[in-house]
Structures are given as C-alpha cells and as structure tokens.
Image: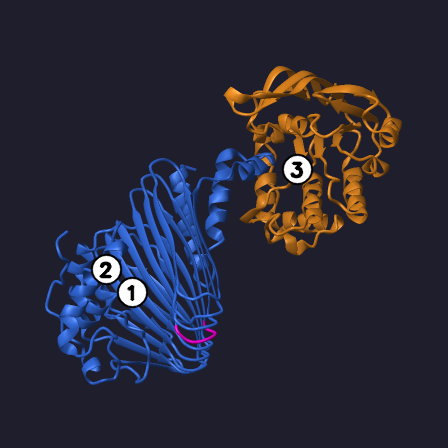
Chain colours: A orange, B blue
C-alpha cells in the first residue's frame, strides 16, 4: 500500500472570484521507506503542493485525488490531516508570542494522542523527552520556554521544525525548503534529524531548490516540477544533472 | 450638554489648609476650589475623556460612604501609615486631569497616608473592599517596594490612589481588578521623581462598567515608567481605560503595552495619551495597544494620542484591532491541534504577553476562564 498517492492533482490559490491555477495535473506516489525530492524553478508550484497536501486555507483542489494511507484528504481540515500522520515542516515557521514552545508541543502531542485513542504522555516524562530532542538538534532547551519561534533566528526556526518532526513521528513528512537560509552546519543538523526520523514505515517528501541538501539526505526519487506538473523523474543523479545544467533543458 | 456639577459642596481637607501638601497649581486658595473643579469638569479635555462612558454616575458616587482599605505588610520596618502626610511631597495634583479624584479627596476629608523610606523586604498589599478612602503612598529617596493591589466589591465602588516617588526610588505595582462590580471607578496618579522607576502590571476583567483612569507623570530627569496591562472583557461587560502619560522633563523613558480581548457583546475603550512637554529633550516614549475581537458584536474603541512640544524625542505609538491570525491558526492546526483549541491557545497567548509580575498567577486563570466560557470550550 502506498503512503501518499496524488493523482492528476489540479489546485488553485486565491479567493473564489480570482482563483489562479497552480497545480495542473500532478502525480506522485510515495511508498513507506522512500524519500522523494521535488525540485523545480521558482513559481513552479512546489510550495503550493506542500500547502495543498497539508490543507492550508486559501487553496482549492479542483480535480484529481490525494490520499494518505488510502484515506481521502481533500475534505479534511489541517488538524485532521495531521492526526492521520501528515506533517509539514514550514518554509517560514510562524512566530507565536505568548504561547510557549513547550505548551504548544504538549497541546500538539495531546491532540494527536486523543485523536488516535492513545494515552496522553505524562508531563514530566514529556518535558524530559522534548529537552533531549531539542539538544539533539542543537537547540538550546531555553528556547522551549520562549514563545513559539519568537525571536528565533532562521536556523533556530528550522531546527525547531525538525525537533517537532522527531517528536510527532508522522507517517509522512513534507519538508518545504527546509534548507533555505541555512548555513552548512545547520544544514547538517537538519539533515541528520531527518535521517534519524526516516525508517521503513514512513515517507519523506523533500521540496528543495538546491542539490546540496541531497548530499546529506539521499533521495530514492527526484522529480522536477514545472508549471504545476512533474515533467521529469529519476534517481539522485537527476539532481546532479540539474545542478549542472539548470532547468532550462527540461522546460 | 448640561453642565456637570458635583453632588455636594466641597471643603478642602485639613492637610491642605495646614500647608502639609501643596495645592494644585489651578488653586490659589481654598475659595477657588469649587470654581476650579467646575471649570475642569466642564472642559473640552474632560468631555473628551468621558466620551464613551457616562461621568454622571461616577460624580454621584463621589460623596458616598467609604471604608479604610486593608493593608498587609504595613507593620514592617520602613513603612509608616498615618492620617497626615509627610511634608514636601509632590503628588502632582492636577485638576484638569482629575477633577473627580480631587473632589473625592475633599469629600473623604480623611485619607490614608503611607510612607516608605527604605527598601522593603516584603510586599505591601492594599486590599480594597468596595469604596475606600483615598490612599496617598509616597516612597522616600532610594526606597524600594513591591505594591500589590486587589479589589473586591459589587456595587459602585470607587478607589483612588496617589503615588509619589522621590529621587532614586523604585516601585513595582501589580493590580488585579477582576471582580465584576456594577460600576467600578479606579483612579491612579503617579508622580515619578529623578531617576526613579515605576512599573505597573495591570490586570482587569470587565464589570458593568470598569473605568480605569491612570495618570503618570515622569517629572524627574532620568525617570522611567512602564505600564503593562491585560484585560478580558466578555459578556455584556465593559472596560474604559484612560491613560495619560506626561513627560515633563528631559531624558525620561516610558513604555506602555496594553492587550485587551473583547468578546461577544463586550465593550472596551482605550485612550492613551502621551504628552511630551517643552524641554523634555531625549524622551523615549512608546505605546502599543492591541485589541483582539472574538465572537460577535464586540465593541472596541481605541485612540492613541501624541502631543509633543519638543523636537529631540523618540516616540512610537500604535493601536491595532484585529482577529486571530490565520497564519498562526494554520501553524497550530497543522500540528493536529483542533481549531477550537488553537483559538484558545492564541487568545491566552495574547493575554499572557501582558500578564506579568507577582499577581499574574492569580489573574491568568480568571482571564483565561473567561475566554473559555466565551468560546464554549
């Protein structure tokens, strides 16, 4: 059974009277244990794909299907998709002053446990686990007391995303340009986190502009997205070729 | 509009006629008091301050019965409580700003004078039950204190507090006004001397009407004022906050952050005026008032005002009225948190940003509970 199945996906962005078509018949299938990289020029629809998959308001699926473990996602709210096991690492993680990182993480883990009929974790053990995870992605545990992402640097925000990935252990992780704006050290920390997360039961969709991240997180498949469609798929050598030649020879 | 008038004739309290405290600048001798009060009550400035709430019920209550507030921590070394003031204190009485509060001093005749002359070990607490006599609190040079102020009552209570901070003194003031009275009027005036610091952590819930007049004077060089306030107004309740912050001399600093949530049918008015006088060079003053409307039919009035009569100042002010951010909601829900819980978390976070100091722990659950009731969670 495939984990994520996207077939002939058409999606638009914008209010009802001024919708703009972004995805125009996109297909992708991710099986457990696989890492898929999606590359493509600016404006090709990469971030839209991430937003449509996670159910961000403002995007409309006009045709096609998307399923996660055979459950249709199109009618589900963002929190229901997360409860099914979908996770989006944001390109621009949102700052939320007044809501502490720890409080936010506890609310998230509790909600997921409740939805799945599991027991909510014991608070003391939970705090300990989160502190360990924060340290493991090079994030000072002091940051857990701050407002969510409040005053974090770009790199700290991305590490916070990866910390959540490791804590929530989703079935499918979508990383939307998690490498953008990172220096080499931070990039390695992020990649190491993703590698620690992935196993034979879950899947990763890696949206990126640059081949460099793929040196650290080795993809099983590389897809090129242009004008709302996958126009080329291959293995990791495709990424190297793109690095060398750009996108022009494909589009 | 008919002229406003006081309910009874006014007589100056003894401590003024004996010269222990200086009269406001507008009054030369006791004969002037009625006309000066009347002029102040009917001034344009005063009408503007009472644009969104009725002043008449407050005026009627000025001469009503009052009791002594309960003081905790008054027996410690460094605190003197008396019926007469220390001499040579500047409370900055200003009739144009506060005719009601000054009239209240006159009707009360007696007042509670608290003087602090050293760094206190324990906080000083003032508990108001219903209407209380005016409190005049002074800190001597280099004194330090934490003041906790609490309120209970349900009818038409009135509480007035005047604070004078001498050179180099520090006061951390926390105030909780969480019980819903029918009409609660609170007046607070603070005069901050040279290099003195004043911090107010203000937490309020709604009442039939809760009216908070706050007048802060940065009157000594290098003085610093900070006002951090959070309020949750739900149901059909109302809050009216009128803050005047004056910089009278050079190199003063002030910061005000006021977060208010107004839910279904609630009404909140905020008027924050910063007045920087001529010669107050090097002043640094900021004011931010953020309002969050939840549910339907919330009424929010906000008006930040700047009056600047000197060139060399740094001044920033802003007011926003909004709803919860879609971006923040999406971020939380994308982590599996239900929209209802996400809204509650964000509303709480909005208040939490301005819920600080020693009374925060008592205030937060009450304010948050009001949010939860509002959201039916």
Q: Are marks 2 and 3 on the same chain?
A: no
On what subunit does the disc labeled 3 rest?
Answer: A
Q: Nearer the viewer, residue B130 or B30?
A: B30
In the picture provided, is B11 more to the left or to the right than A96? left
Could you say whether the residue bearing mark 2 is in a helix, strand or loop? loop
Tell me whether circle 1 and circle 2 mark residues in contact (CB < 8 Å): yes
Q: Which label sits on residue B157?
A: 2
In the picture provided, is B365 more to the left or to the right than A219? left
Residue beneath disc 1 = B128
Give the residue drawn at x 13%, y 76%. Answer: B31
The magenta stretch spans which residues? Answer: B219-223
Res A22 visible: yes
Q: Which label sits on residue A155?
A: none
Measured along the vertical axis of the image, is residue B109 above or below residue B61?
A: below
Q: Which label sits on residue A90?
A: 3
Could you say whether the residue bearing mark 1 is in a helix, strand or loop? strand
Where is residue B293 drawn, in percent x and y? 40, 41
């Amino acid at each position: 059974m495939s984990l994520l199945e996207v077939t002939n996906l058409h999606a638009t962005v914008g209010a009802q009277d001024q919708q703009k078509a972004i995805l125009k018949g996109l297909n992708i299938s991710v099986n457990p244990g696989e890492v898929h990289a999606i590359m493509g020029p600016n404006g090709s629809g990469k971030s839209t794909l991430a937003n449509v998959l996670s159910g961000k308001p403002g995007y409309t699926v006009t045709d096609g299907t998307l399923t996660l473990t055979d459950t249709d996602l199109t009618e589900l709210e963002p929190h229901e998709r997360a409860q099914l096991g979908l996770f989006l690492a944001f390109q621009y993680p949102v700052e939320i002053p007044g809501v502490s990182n720890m409080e936010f993480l506890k609310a998230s883990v509790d909600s997921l446990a409740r939805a799945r009929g599991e027991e909510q974790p014991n608070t003391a053990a939970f705090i300990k686990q989160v502190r360990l995870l924060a340290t493991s992605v090079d994030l000072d545990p002091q940051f857990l007391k701050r407002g969510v992402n409040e005053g974090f640097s770009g790199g700290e925000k991305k590490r916070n995303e990866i910390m959540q990935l490791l804590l929530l252990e989703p079935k499918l992780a979508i990383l939307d340009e998690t490498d953008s704006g990172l220096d080499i050290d931070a990039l390695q920390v992020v990649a190491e986190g993703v590698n620690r997360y992935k196993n034979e039961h879950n899947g990763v969709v890696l949206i990126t502009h640059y081949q460099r991240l793929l040196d650290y997180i080795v993809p099983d498949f590389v897809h090129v997205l242009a004008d709302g469609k996958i126009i080329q798929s291959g293995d990791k050598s495709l990424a190297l070729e793109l690095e060398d030649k750009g996108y022009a020879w494909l589009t | 509009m008919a002229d406003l008038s006081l309910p009874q004739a006014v007589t100056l309290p003894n401590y003024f006629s004996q010269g222990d405290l200086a009269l406001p600048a507008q009054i030369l001798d006791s004969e002037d008091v009625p006309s000066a009060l009347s002029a102040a009550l009917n001034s344009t400035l005063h009408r503007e301050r009472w644009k969104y709430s009725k002043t008449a019920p407050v005026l009627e209550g000025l001469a009503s019965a009052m009791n002594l507030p309960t003081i905790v921590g008054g027996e410690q070394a460094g605190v003197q409580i008396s019926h007469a003031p220390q001499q040579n204190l500047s409370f900055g009485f200003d009739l144009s700003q506060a005719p009601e509060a000054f009239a209240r001093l006159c009707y009360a005749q007696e007042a509670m004078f608290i003087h602090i002359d050293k760094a206190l070990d324990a906080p000083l607490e003032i508990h108001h039950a219903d209407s209380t006599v005016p409190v005049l609190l002074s800190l001597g040079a280099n004194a330090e204190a934490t003041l906790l102020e609490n309120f209970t009552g349900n009818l038409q209570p009135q509480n007035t507090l005047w604070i004078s901070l001498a050179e180099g003194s520090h006061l951390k003031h926390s105030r909780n006004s969480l019980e819903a009275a029918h009409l609660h009027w609170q007046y607070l005036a603070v005069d901050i001397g040279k290099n003195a610091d004043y911090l107010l952590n203000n937490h309020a819930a709604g009442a039939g009407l809760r009216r908070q007049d706050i007048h802060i004077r940065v009157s000594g060089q290098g003085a610093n004022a900070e006002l951090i306030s959070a309020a949750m107004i739900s149901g059909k309740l109302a809050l009216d906050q009128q803050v005047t912050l004056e910089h009278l001399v050079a190199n003063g600093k002030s910061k005000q952050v006021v977060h208010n949530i107004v839910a279904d049918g609630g009404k909140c008015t905020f008027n924050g005026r910063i007045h920087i006088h001529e010669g107050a060079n090097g002043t640094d003053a900021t004011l931010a008032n953020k309002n969050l409307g939840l549910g339907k039919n919330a009424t929010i009035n906000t008006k930040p005002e700047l009056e600047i009569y000197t060139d060399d100042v740094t001044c920033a002010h802003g007011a926003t009225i909004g709803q919860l951010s879609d971006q923040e909601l999406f971020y939380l829900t994308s982590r599996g948190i239900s929209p209802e819980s996400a809204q509650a978390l964000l509303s709480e976070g909005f208040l939490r940003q301005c819920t600080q100091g020693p009374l925060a722990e008592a205030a937060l659950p009450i304010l948050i509970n009001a949010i939860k009731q509002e959201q039916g969670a």
